[in-house]
Image (cartoon, rainbow, N blue to C red):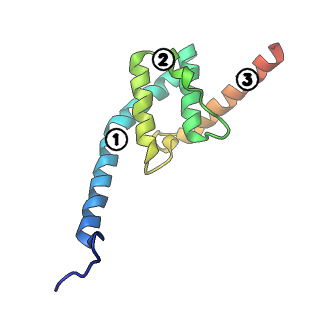
């Protein structure tokens, strides 16, 4: 049976190939992004300046309205952490799920960081 398409319109086969290519691209992004996310989460749980910047980055991916991320914070990270942050950002741009759902007990971790960063901000507002 002959397929009838209008000039330039994709065929069902074209659409299937496009979807398959997009799925492969996302799988490739996750292959690099998930290990990078795990490394960032490990650092975010510590108490250093880099940890704060990473927490803010991850909170910004989680809820950009509540946690806008200042790009200058990336300059305060080691090169390997910068690369991890960019890999996670790339993965998150077309993610199959929200960033915190890639991590075991991600809800709890992100909630903890939310409260921790709010408390830090409140402490710094009263000092200023």
Residue at image mark 3? 121
In this rendering, position of residue 77 left or right of residue 19? right
- Mark found first going from the N terminus, 1 or 2: 1
How far apart marks 1 and 2 lie (CA) works out to 21 Å
Question: Which image quarter is the N terminus in?
Answer: bottom left
Q: Is residue 50 visible?
A: yes
Residue at image mark 1? 29
Pointer 1 local density, CA inside 10 Å: few below 14, some 14–19, many at least 20? many
Residue at image mark 2? 77
Instruction: Residue at 46%, 39% (x, y): give it.
Output: 103
Residue 127 position (above or below residue 33): above
Instruction: Residue at 44%, 15% (x, y): give it.
Output: 78
How far apart marks 3 and 2 lie (CA) works out to 20 Å
Where disc 3 sits, the SS reads: helix
In the rendered image, residue 122, in percent from the top left (x then y), is placed at 77, 23
Residue 119 position (above or below residue 96): above
How far apart marks 3 and 1 lie (CA) works out to 33 Å
């Amino acid at each position: 049976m002959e397929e009838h398409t209008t000039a330039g319109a994709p065929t069902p086969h074209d659409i299937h190939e496009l979807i398959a290519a997009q799925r492969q691209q996302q799988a490739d992004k996750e292959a690099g992004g998930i290990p990078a996310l795990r490394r960032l989460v490990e650092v975010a749980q510590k108490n250093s300046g880099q940890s704060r910047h990473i927490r803010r980055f991850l909170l910004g991916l989680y809820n950009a309205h509540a946690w806008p991320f200042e790009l200058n914070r990336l300059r305060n990270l080691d090169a390997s952490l910068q690369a991890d942050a960019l890999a996670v950002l790339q993965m998150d741009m077309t993610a199959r799920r929200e960033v915190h759902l890639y991590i075991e007990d991600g809800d709890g971790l992100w909630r903890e960081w939310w409260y921790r960063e709010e408390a830090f901000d409140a402490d710094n507002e009263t000092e200023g």
